[in-house]
Image (spheres, rainbow, N blue to C red):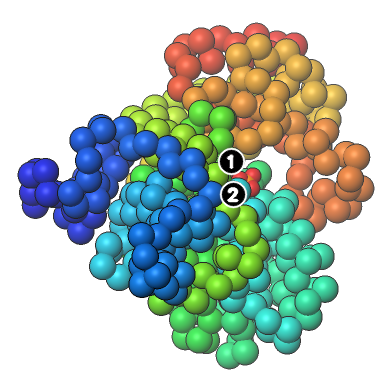
Amino acid sequence: MMRSSSNDQTVATMTQANPETLCAQPPRAPGEASSLVPPIVYSATFAARDAQEFAAMASQPRHARYYTRYGNPLHEQVAAQLVALEGGDAGTHDALLAASGMGAVSLVMLGLLKAGDHVVAQTNHYMGTAKHLSELLPRFGVRATLVDQTDLAAWERAIAPGTRLVVMETPVNPTCALTDLAAVARLARAAGAISVCDNTFACPLNQQPLALGVDLVVHSATKYLGGHHDLTAGAVIGARALIDALWPTQICLGATLSPMDAWLLLRGVRTLALRVRQHNASALELARWLEQQPQVERVFYPGLESHPQHALARRQMNGFGGVMNILVRGGYEPASRFVHALTLPRQAVSLGGVESLVVHAAAMWRGTMNDEQMRVAGIAPNAVRLSVGIEGVEDLRADLAQALQAA
Ligand SMILES: *Cc1c(COP(=O)(O)O)cnc(C)c1O
Protein backbone atom coordinates (compact mmCIF):
# COMPACT_ATOMS: atom_id res chain seq x y z
CA MET A 1 0.00 0.00 0.00
CA MET A 2 1.04 3.56 -0.56
CA ARG A 3 2.36 5.24 2.52
CA SER A 4 1.60 8.75 1.36
CA SER A 5 -0.55 10.49 -1.18
CA SER A 6 0.91 13.93 -0.66
CA ASN A 7 2.54 15.92 -3.41
CA ASP A 8 5.92 15.07 -1.95
CA GLN A 9 5.41 11.43 -2.78
CA THR A 10 8.76 10.10 -3.95
CA VAL A 11 10.08 7.08 -5.78
CA ALA A 12 10.70 5.40 -2.41
CA THR A 13 7.04 5.48 -1.43
CA MET A 14 5.94 4.44 -4.94
CA THR A 15 7.48 0.98 -4.58
CA GLN A 16 4.93 0.29 -1.82
CA ALA A 17 1.96 0.78 -4.15
CA ASN A 18 -0.18 -1.78 -5.98
CA PRO A 19 0.77 -2.54 -9.61
CA GLU A 20 -2.26 -0.65 -10.97
CA THR A 21 -1.13 2.47 -9.13
CA LEU A 22 2.50 2.03 -10.15
CA CYS A 23 1.34 1.90 -13.78
CA ALA A 24 -1.12 4.78 -13.67
CA GLN A 25 1.20 7.18 -11.86
CA PRO A 26 4.86 7.11 -12.82
CA PRO A 27 7.15 8.04 -9.93
CA ARG A 28 7.58 11.77 -9.51
CA ALA A 29 10.77 13.48 -8.61
CA PRO A 30 10.43 15.51 -5.38
CA GLY A 31 9.58 19.13 -6.15
CA GLU A 32 8.74 18.35 -9.79
CA ALA A 33 7.01 21.14 -11.73
CA SER A 34 3.29 21.12 -12.40
CA SER A 35 2.95 19.62 -15.90
CA LEU A 36 1.01 16.41 -15.29
CA VAL A 37 2.61 14.64 -18.25
CA PRO A 38 6.39 14.95 -18.19
CA PRO A 39 7.91 16.99 -21.02
CA ILE A 40 10.03 15.27 -23.66
CA VAL A 41 13.47 16.68 -23.06
CA TYR A 42 14.72 16.56 -26.63
CA SER A 43 18.23 17.73 -26.01
CA ALA A 44 21.38 15.77 -26.83
CA THR A 45 23.38 17.78 -24.32
CA PHE A 46 22.88 19.93 -21.22
CA ALA A 47 24.66 23.13 -20.22
CA ALA A 48 26.37 23.60 -16.86
CA ARG A 49 26.07 26.87 -14.94
CA ASP A 50 29.73 26.88 -13.91
CA ALA A 51 32.93 24.86 -13.97
CA GLN A 52 32.16 23.17 -10.68
CA GLU A 53 28.76 21.97 -11.88
CA PHE A 54 30.28 20.77 -15.17
CA ALA A 55 32.85 18.69 -13.30
CA ALA A 56 30.10 17.18 -11.14
CA MET A 57 27.95 16.36 -14.19
CA ALA A 58 30.82 14.72 -16.03
CA SER A 59 31.86 12.48 -13.16
CA GLN A 60 28.46 11.23 -11.94
CA PRO A 61 27.34 7.95 -13.55
CA ARG A 62 23.89 8.10 -15.19
CA HIS A 63 23.54 11.85 -14.67
CA ALA A 64 20.07 12.73 -16.00
CA ARG A 65 21.22 16.06 -17.47
CA TYR A 66 24.70 15.76 -18.91
CA TYR A 67 24.57 14.08 -22.36
CA THR A 68 21.61 11.98 -23.53
CA ARG A 69 23.70 8.90 -24.33
CA TYR A 70 24.57 8.99 -20.61
CA GLY A 71 21.01 9.70 -19.48
CA ASN A 72 17.97 11.87 -19.94
CA PRO A 73 15.40 13.14 -17.41
CA LEU A 74 12.80 10.76 -18.86
CA HIS A 75 15.16 7.78 -18.57
CA GLU A 76 15.30 8.33 -14.82
CA GLN A 77 11.52 8.24 -14.55
CA VAL A 78 11.10 5.17 -16.77
CA ALA A 79 13.86 3.34 -14.88
CA ALA A 80 12.27 4.08 -11.50
CA GLN A 81 8.89 2.86 -12.76
CA LEU A 82 10.30 -0.40 -14.14
CA VAL A 83 12.22 -1.09 -10.91
CA ALA A 84 8.99 -0.62 -8.96
CA LEU A 85 6.97 -2.83 -11.33
CA GLU A 86 9.54 -5.63 -11.09
CA GLY A 87 9.22 -5.47 -7.31
CA GLY A 88 12.69 -4.02 -6.86
CA ASP A 89 13.50 -1.66 -4.03
CA ALA A 90 14.04 1.98 -4.99
CA GLY A 91 16.89 2.19 -2.48
CA THR A 92 18.85 -0.85 -3.61
CA HIS A 93 17.76 -1.59 -7.20
CA ASP A 94 18.12 0.29 -10.45
CA ALA A 95 17.56 -0.09 -14.19
CA LEU A 96 19.31 0.77 -17.44
CA LEU A 97 17.32 1.50 -20.56
CA ALA A 98 18.33 0.53 -24.07
CA ALA A 99 17.26 1.36 -27.60
CA SER A 100 15.76 -2.15 -28.00
CA GLY A 101 15.34 -5.46 -26.24
CA MET A 102 18.41 -6.74 -28.05
CA GLY A 103 20.25 -3.63 -26.83
CA ALA A 104 19.43 -4.78 -23.30
CA VAL A 105 20.44 -8.41 -23.98
CA SER A 106 23.71 -7.24 -25.57
CA LEU A 107 24.39 -5.02 -22.59
CA VAL A 108 24.08 -7.94 -20.16
CA MET A 109 26.20 -10.31 -22.28
CA LEU A 110 28.97 -7.89 -23.21
CA GLY A 111 28.86 -6.09 -19.88
CA LEU A 112 29.36 -9.22 -17.77
CA LEU A 113 31.35 -11.63 -19.95
CA LYS A 114 34.97 -11.76 -21.01
CA ALA A 115 37.09 -14.21 -23.04
CA GLY A 116 37.28 -17.62 -21.37
CA ASP A 117 33.96 -17.27 -19.54
CA HIS A 118 31.30 -19.97 -19.55
CA VAL A 119 27.56 -19.32 -20.01
CA VAL A 120 24.66 -21.69 -19.47
CA ALA A 121 21.53 -20.91 -21.47
CA GLN A 122 18.53 -22.61 -23.06
CA THR A 123 18.36 -24.49 -26.38
CA ASN A 124 15.33 -22.31 -27.12
CA HIS A 125 15.56 -18.55 -26.89
CA TYR A 126 14.32 -15.49 -28.72
CA MET A 127 16.22 -15.72 -32.02
CA GLY A 128 18.39 -12.65 -31.38
CA THR A 129 19.50 -14.04 -28.02
CA ALA A 130 20.13 -17.46 -29.57
CA LYS A 131 22.35 -15.86 -32.22
CA HIS A 132 24.21 -13.96 -29.52
CA LEU A 133 25.02 -17.27 -27.84
CA SER A 134 25.85 -19.25 -30.98
CA GLU A 135 27.60 -16.64 -33.14
CA LEU A 136 28.58 -13.39 -31.41
CA LEU A 137 29.92 -14.60 -28.05
CA PRO A 138 32.11 -17.40 -29.55
CA ARG A 139 33.91 -14.70 -31.58
CA PHE A 140 34.99 -13.21 -28.26
CA GLY A 141 36.05 -16.51 -26.69
CA VAL A 142 32.93 -17.10 -24.59
CA ARG A 143 31.65 -20.68 -24.42
CA ALA A 144 27.95 -21.47 -24.01
CA THR A 145 26.34 -24.72 -22.87
CA LEU A 146 22.71 -24.95 -24.00
CA VAL A 147 20.20 -27.03 -22.01
CA ASP A 148 16.58 -28.13 -22.31
CA GLN A 149 14.97 -25.45 -20.15
CA THR A 150 12.33 -27.87 -18.83
CA ASP A 151 14.96 -30.30 -17.48
CA LEU A 152 16.24 -29.22 -14.07
CA ALA A 153 18.82 -32.02 -14.00
CA ALA A 154 20.29 -30.67 -17.26
CA TRP A 155 20.69 -27.22 -15.70
CA GLU A 156 22.32 -28.83 -12.68
CA ARG A 157 24.80 -30.76 -14.85
CA ALA A 158 25.68 -27.69 -16.95
CA ILE A 159 26.11 -25.05 -14.23
CA ALA A 160 29.63 -25.46 -12.86
CA PRO A 161 31.80 -23.44 -10.45
CA GLY A 162 33.41 -21.67 -13.46
CA THR A 163 30.05 -20.55 -14.90
CA ARG A 164 29.77 -16.77 -15.03
CA LEU A 165 26.24 -16.22 -16.40
CA VAL A 166 23.02 -18.26 -16.48
CA VAL A 167 20.46 -17.09 -19.06
CA MET A 168 16.75 -17.91 -18.77
CA GLU A 169 13.70 -16.95 -20.79
CA THR A 170 10.22 -18.00 -19.61
CA PRO A 171 7.71 -18.45 -21.15
CA VAL A 172 10.04 -18.86 -24.10
CA ASN A 173 9.51 -17.70 -27.66
CA PRO A 174 7.76 -19.30 -29.52
CA THR A 175 6.92 -22.61 -27.78
CA CYS A 176 5.76 -21.19 -24.41
CA ALA A 177 7.91 -23.75 -22.51
CA LEU A 178 8.81 -22.63 -18.99
CA THR A 179 11.95 -22.46 -16.86
CA ASP A 180 11.77 -23.01 -13.09
CA LEU A 181 13.11 -19.60 -12.10
CA ALA A 182 13.57 -20.22 -8.37
CA ALA A 183 15.32 -23.57 -8.87
CA VAL A 184 17.70 -22.40 -11.63
CA ALA A 185 18.46 -19.15 -9.79
CA ARG A 186 19.40 -21.24 -6.74
CA LEU A 187 21.76 -23.42 -8.83
CA ALA A 188 23.34 -20.29 -10.34
CA ARG A 189 23.85 -18.69 -6.95
CA ALA A 190 25.41 -21.85 -5.50
CA ALA A 191 27.93 -21.88 -8.37
CA GLY A 192 28.74 -18.19 -7.97
CA ALA A 193 27.15 -17.31 -11.32
CA ILE A 194 24.94 -14.34 -12.13
CA SER A 195 21.42 -15.24 -13.32
CA VAL A 196 19.34 -13.27 -15.81
CA CYS A 197 15.78 -13.79 -17.01
CA ASP A 198 14.20 -12.37 -20.16
CA ASN A 199 10.77 -11.48 -18.73
CA THR A 200 9.32 -10.09 -21.98
CA PHE A 201 6.67 -12.79 -22.56
CA ALA A 202 5.29 -12.69 -19.02
CA CYS A 203 5.76 -8.97 -18.20
CA PRO A 204 6.20 -7.84 -14.59
CA LEU A 205 2.52 -8.02 -13.71
CA ASN A 206 2.45 -11.74 -14.42
CA GLN A 207 5.92 -12.75 -13.18
CA GLN A 208 8.58 -11.17 -10.98
CA PRO A 209 11.90 -12.99 -11.36
CA LEU A 210 13.74 -10.82 -8.80
CA ALA A 211 11.44 -12.10 -6.04
CA LEU A 212 12.32 -15.67 -7.10
CA GLY A 213 16.03 -15.03 -6.63
CA VAL A 214 17.04 -14.08 -10.19
CA ASP A 215 19.74 -11.37 -10.28
CA LEU A 216 18.82 -9.46 -13.44
CA VAL A 217 15.66 -9.03 -15.51
CA VAL A 218 15.76 -7.98 -19.15
CA HIS A 219 12.84 -6.77 -21.22
CA SER A 220 11.99 -6.01 -24.76
CA ALA A 221 9.84 -3.02 -23.80
CA THR A 222 8.78 -3.02 -27.45
CA LYS A 223 6.24 -5.67 -26.41
CA TYR A 224 3.86 -5.49 -23.39
CA LEU A 225 5.49 -2.57 -21.59
CA GLY A 226 5.07 -0.23 -24.56
CA GLY A 227 1.99 -2.15 -25.61
CA HIS A 228 1.01 -0.29 -28.79
CA HIS A 229 3.46 -1.54 -31.44
CA ASP A 230 4.79 1.99 -31.85
CA LEU A 231 8.11 2.10 -29.98
CA THR A 232 11.32 0.08 -29.72
CA ALA A 233 12.96 -0.12 -26.30
CA GLY A 234 14.71 -2.41 -23.83
CA ALA A 235 15.57 -2.48 -20.15
CA VAL A 236 17.79 -4.26 -17.62
CA ILE A 237 16.68 -4.25 -13.97
CA GLY A 238 18.57 -5.50 -10.92
CA ALA A 239 20.53 -4.71 -7.78
CA ARG A 240 22.29 -1.36 -8.04
CA ALA A 241 25.77 -2.91 -7.73
CA LEU A 242 25.15 -5.01 -10.87
CA ILE A 243 23.57 -2.14 -12.77
CA ASP A 244 26.56 0.03 -11.85
CA ALA A 245 28.86 -2.72 -13.15
CA LEU A 246 27.01 -2.66 -16.52
CA TRP A 247 27.14 1.10 -16.84
CA PRO A 248 30.61 1.51 -18.46
CA THR A 249 29.57 -1.00 -21.16
CA GLN A 250 26.26 0.80 -21.70
CA ILE A 251 27.95 4.05 -22.66
CA CYS A 252 30.39 2.18 -24.93
CA LEU A 253 27.66 0.22 -26.74
CA GLY A 254 25.65 3.39 -27.23
CA ALA A 255 22.25 1.69 -27.62
CA THR A 256 20.56 4.74 -26.08
CA LEU A 257 16.79 4.97 -25.72
CA SER A 258 15.59 8.07 -27.57
CA PRO A 259 13.72 10.68 -25.48
CA MET A 260 10.67 10.21 -27.73
CA ASP A 261 10.56 6.44 -27.21
CA ALA A 262 11.16 6.92 -23.46
CA TRP A 263 8.13 9.22 -23.43
CA LEU A 264 6.02 6.75 -25.42
CA LEU A 265 7.08 4.01 -23.01
CA LEU A 266 5.94 6.07 -20.00
CA ARG A 267 2.67 6.64 -21.82
CA GLY A 268 2.28 2.95 -22.62
CA VAL A 269 3.03 1.69 -19.12
CA ARG A 270 0.24 3.86 -17.66
CA THR A 271 -2.33 1.35 -19.02
CA LEU A 272 -0.19 -1.79 -18.59
CA ALA A 273 -2.21 -3.26 -15.71
CA LEU A 274 -5.49 -2.79 -17.56
CA ARG A 275 -4.15 -4.19 -20.81
CA VAL A 276 -2.50 -7.22 -19.21
CA ARG A 277 -5.69 -8.15 -17.38
CA GLN A 278 -7.46 -8.26 -20.77
CA HIS A 279 -4.61 -10.10 -22.55
CA ASN A 280 -4.62 -12.73 -19.78
CA ALA A 281 -8.39 -13.21 -19.78
CA SER A 282 -8.88 -13.27 -23.56
CA ALA A 283 -5.91 -15.56 -24.22
CA LEU A 284 -7.01 -18.09 -21.60
CA GLU A 285 -10.56 -18.13 -22.97
CA LEU A 286 -9.40 -18.50 -26.59
CA ALA A 287 -6.77 -21.13 -25.73
CA ARG A 288 -9.42 -23.25 -23.96
CA TRP A 289 -11.74 -22.91 -26.96
CA LEU A 290 -9.02 -23.56 -29.54
CA GLU A 291 -7.88 -26.80 -27.95
CA GLN A 292 -11.44 -28.17 -28.39
CA GLN A 293 -11.47 -27.52 -32.15
CA PRO A 294 -11.03 -30.51 -34.52
CA GLN A 295 -8.62 -28.60 -36.80
CA VAL A 296 -6.27 -27.94 -33.85
CA GLU A 297 -3.76 -30.60 -32.87
CA ARG A 298 -2.43 -28.92 -29.72
CA VAL A 299 -2.33 -25.55 -27.98
CA PHE A 300 0.63 -24.61 -25.79
CA TYR A 301 -0.39 -21.90 -23.32
CA PRO A 302 0.90 -21.86 -19.72
CA GLY A 303 -2.60 -21.23 -18.39
CA LEU A 304 -4.03 -24.44 -19.86
CA GLU A 305 -4.28 -27.49 -17.60
CA SER A 306 -2.89 -29.44 -20.59
CA HIS A 307 0.40 -27.45 -20.61
CA PRO A 308 3.10 -29.92 -19.50
CA GLN A 309 4.36 -27.37 -16.94
CA HIS A 310 1.04 -25.97 -15.80
CA ALA A 311 1.85 -26.60 -12.12
CA LEU A 312 5.06 -24.58 -12.46
CA ALA A 313 3.15 -21.83 -14.30
CA ARG A 314 0.71 -21.58 -11.37
CA ARG A 315 3.62 -21.47 -8.93
CA GLN A 316 5.67 -18.72 -10.54
CA MET A 317 3.15 -16.68 -12.56
CA ASN A 318 0.19 -14.53 -11.50
CA GLY A 319 -1.31 -14.57 -14.99
CA PHE A 320 -0.30 -16.31 -18.19
CA GLY A 321 -0.01 -13.53 -20.77
CA GLY A 322 -1.41 -13.17 -24.26
CA VAL A 323 0.85 -15.43 -26.32
CA MET A 324 0.12 -19.03 -27.29
CA ASN A 325 1.57 -21.56 -29.70
CA ILE A 326 -1.07 -23.34 -31.79
CA LEU A 327 -0.30 -26.55 -33.70
CA VAL A 328 -2.68 -26.78 -36.66
CA ARG A 329 -3.63 -30.35 -37.65
CA GLY A 330 -2.17 -31.48 -40.99
CA GLY A 331 1.19 -29.70 -41.23
CA TYR A 332 2.61 -26.64 -42.97
CA GLU A 333 -0.08 -26.03 -45.61
CA PRO A 334 -3.16 -26.04 -43.36
CA ALA A 335 -1.27 -23.81 -40.87
CA SER A 336 -0.45 -21.43 -43.70
CA ARG A 337 -4.09 -21.37 -44.91
CA PHE A 338 -5.29 -20.72 -41.34
CA VAL A 339 -2.96 -17.75 -40.89
CA HIS A 340 -3.84 -16.25 -44.28
CA ALA A 341 -7.60 -16.60 -43.62
CA LEU A 342 -7.43 -14.60 -40.37
CA THR A 343 -8.67 -11.03 -40.72
CA LEU A 344 -8.43 -9.55 -37.20
CA PRO A 345 -5.00 -10.74 -36.04
CA ARG A 346 -2.51 -9.02 -38.32
CA GLN A 347 0.30 -11.07 -39.82
CA ALA A 348 3.32 -9.37 -38.28
CA VAL A 349 6.25 -10.16 -36.01
CA SER A 350 6.24 -8.78 -32.44
CA LEU A 351 3.67 -9.38 -29.69
CA GLY A 352 2.20 -7.93 -26.54
CA GLY A 353 0.40 -4.96 -28.07
CA VAL A 354 -3.23 -3.94 -28.25
CA GLU A 355 -3.66 -5.46 -31.74
CA SER A 356 -3.64 -9.25 -32.05
CA LEU A 357 -0.70 -10.47 -34.15
CA VAL A 358 -0.08 -13.84 -35.72
CA VAL A 359 3.08 -15.45 -37.08
CA HIS A 360 3.55 -18.73 -38.92
CA ALA A 361 7.05 -19.37 -37.54
CA ALA A 362 8.09 -21.96 -40.13
CA ALA A 363 7.24 -19.52 -42.94
CA MET A 364 9.21 -16.81 -41.17
CA TRP A 365 12.39 -18.90 -40.83
CA ARG A 366 12.19 -20.91 -44.07
CA GLY A 367 14.57 -18.53 -45.83
CA THR A 368 17.32 -18.70 -43.19
CA MET A 369 17.05 -22.15 -41.55
CA ASN A 370 16.82 -25.70 -42.83
CA ASP A 371 14.32 -28.23 -41.41
CA GLU A 372 16.83 -29.67 -38.93
CA GLN A 373 17.77 -26.21 -37.58
CA MET A 374 14.07 -25.43 -37.17
CA ARG A 375 13.47 -28.71 -35.34
CA VAL A 376 16.33 -27.95 -32.91
CA ALA A 377 14.95 -24.41 -32.38
CA GLY A 378 11.56 -25.93 -31.51
CA ILE A 379 9.81 -24.58 -34.61
CA ALA A 380 7.24 -27.10 -35.87
CA PRO A 381 6.05 -26.69 -39.50
CA ASN A 382 2.44 -26.36 -38.29
CA ALA A 383 3.11 -24.01 -35.34
CA VAL A 384 1.34 -20.66 -35.28
CA ARG A 385 2.20 -18.04 -32.67
CA LEU A 386 -0.80 -15.97 -31.68
CA SER A 387 -0.43 -12.83 -29.58
CA VAL A 388 -3.92 -12.07 -28.33
CA GLY A 389 -4.67 -8.35 -28.23
CA ILE A 390 -7.40 -6.45 -26.44
CA GLU A 391 -10.06 -6.61 -29.17
CA GLY A 392 -13.47 -8.03 -28.25
CA VAL A 393 -12.89 -11.69 -27.46
CA GLU A 394 -16.10 -12.74 -29.29
CA ASP A 395 -14.85 -11.05 -32.47
CA LEU A 396 -11.51 -12.83 -32.16
CA ARG A 397 -13.20 -16.18 -31.57
CA ALA A 398 -15.44 -15.71 -34.63
CA ASP A 399 -12.45 -14.84 -36.79
CA LEU A 400 -10.44 -17.82 -35.51
CA ALA A 401 -13.42 -20.06 -36.18
CA GLN A 402 -13.84 -18.99 -39.82
CA ALA A 403 -10.06 -19.24 -40.39
CA LEU A 404 -10.00 -22.80 -38.98
CA GLN A 405 -12.73 -23.72 -41.49
CA ALA A 406 -10.32 -22.59 -44.21
CA ALA A 407 -7.34 -24.53 -42.81
C1 LIG B 1 11.27 -9.09 -29.09
C2 LIG B 1 12.05 -9.82 -28.08
C3 LIG B 1 13.40 -9.51 -27.83
C4 LIG B 1 14.13 -8.44 -28.61
O1 LIG B 1 13.56 -7.18 -28.42
P1 LIG B 1 13.69 -5.98 -29.50
O2 LIG B 1 13.01 -4.86 -28.79
O3 LIG B 1 12.99 -6.43 -30.74
O4 LIG B 1 15.13 -5.76 -29.71
C5 LIG B 1 14.06 -10.20 -26.84
N1 LIG B 1 13.45 -11.18 -26.15
C6 LIG B 1 12.17 -11.53 -26.38
C7 LIG B 1 11.56 -12.63 -25.57
C8 LIG B 1 11.42 -10.86 -27.35
O5 LIG B 1 10.16 -11.22 -27.57
Q: Earlier in the sequence, mark 1 or mark 2?
A: 2
What's the amino acid at mark 2? Answer: Ala
When the figure is inspected, residue 186 is found, relative to residue 76, above or below; the finding is below
Image coords of residue 137 (percent x, y): 75, 71
Residue 123, percent across and down? 71, 62
- Mark 1 touches mark 2? (CB < 8 Å): yes
Judging depth in this view, the residue of 174 and 247 nearest the camera is 247
- Kindly tell me whether residue 281 is visible in this rendering: no
* Left or right, residue 126 beside residue 53: right
Residue at the extreme front: 50
Q: Mark 2: few, some, or many residues within 10 Å (few <14, many ≥20)?
A: many
Quadrant in which residue 237 is drawn: bottom left
Q: Residue at x 51, y 37 (%)?
A: 260
- Residue 232: image tag: 1
Alpha carbon separation for disc pair 1 and 2: 6 Å
The residue lying toward the viewer, choosing from 390 and 360, is: 390
**The one of 395 and 40 positioned closer to us in this rendering:** 40
Locate residue 1, reporting x and y percent: 13, 49
Give the residue at mark 2. Answer: 99
Is label 1's Cβ within 8 Å of ligand 1?
Answer: yes
